[in-house]
Amino acid sequence: MGWTLVPGASRESVIEEARASFNGDGSFRDRNEHDQLVTHNVRMSCVRGSVLWTLVDVTVDGVPRGPFIGCVLIEREGGYWGYKVMDETEGPCYYSVPRAYLDASTCELGYAPAWRQKCRERASARR
């Protein structure tokens, strides 16, 4: 996925827009062709350097599916502030996520478990 550049925006407004991108409702069709309602709500968020970290609660058809960690890069490019949204399933190459987010996430998809372990290892090595 690419970058979203926001003409005329400040760093703070881009952070708010990026945070809001993790909130909301959507739907998807499962393998059995059933429509399911998915709701995302940001539980916690913080900015560390040029990375916005979010802990996002997920429900599918009203059933909690556990939180996941969002990773949003915030940069200025060509005079415009912008952001790039990722999540832990993609195994982002950024590791400054708060320990509380690592402990809270229950995501088992994609690279998430291995990435969380790498974050813990890097934090231990820094101490």
Image (spheres, rainbow, N blue to C red):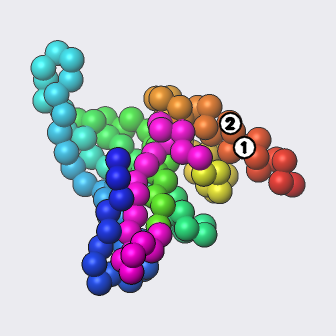
- What stretch of residues is rendered in magenta? 75-93
In the image, is residue 80 above or below residue 57? below
Which residue lies at the image location 13% right of the left edge and 23% below the top edge?
A: 34
In the image, is residue 79 above or below residue 75? below
Foreground of the two, 62 or 74 = 74
Residue 95 location (% of width, % of height): 64, 51
Q: On the rendered structure, is 80 left or right of 27?
A: right
In the picture of the structure, the residue carrying the numbered disc 1 is: 120
Foreground of the two, 48 or 65 = 48
In the picture of the structure, the residue carrying the numbered disc 2 is: 117
Residue 120 location (% of width, % of height): 72, 43
Kindly indicate whether the residue at mark 1 contacts the one at mark 2 (C-beta within 8 angstroms).
Answer: yes
Q: On the rendered structure, is 12 left or right of 120?
A: left
Quadrant in the picture for residue 5? bottom left
In the image, is residue 20 above or below residue 80? above
Which residue lies at the image location 47% right of the left edge and 38% below the top edge?
A: 90
As for residue 92 lying within the magenta part, the answer is yes
In the image, is residue 60 above or below residue 73? above
Residue 45 location (% of width, % of height): 49, 63
Residue 64 location (% of width, % of height): 36, 38
Give the position of the C terminus as an image quadrant: bottom right
Instruction: Name which residue type carries label 1.
Output: Arg
Instruction: Name which residue type carries label 2.
Output: Gln
Q: Is residue 42 visible?
A: no
Foreground of the two, 42 or 96 = 96
Which numbered circle lies on residue 48? Answer: none
Mark 2 and mark 1: Cα distance apart in space: 5 Å
As for residue 90 lying within the magenta part, the answer is yes
Q: Secondary structure at mark 2?
A: helix
Q: Secondary structure at mark 1?
A: helix
How crowded is the residue under tag 2: few (<14 C-alpha within 10 Å), some, or many (20+)?
A: few
Q: On the rendered structure, is 116 left or right of 110?
A: right
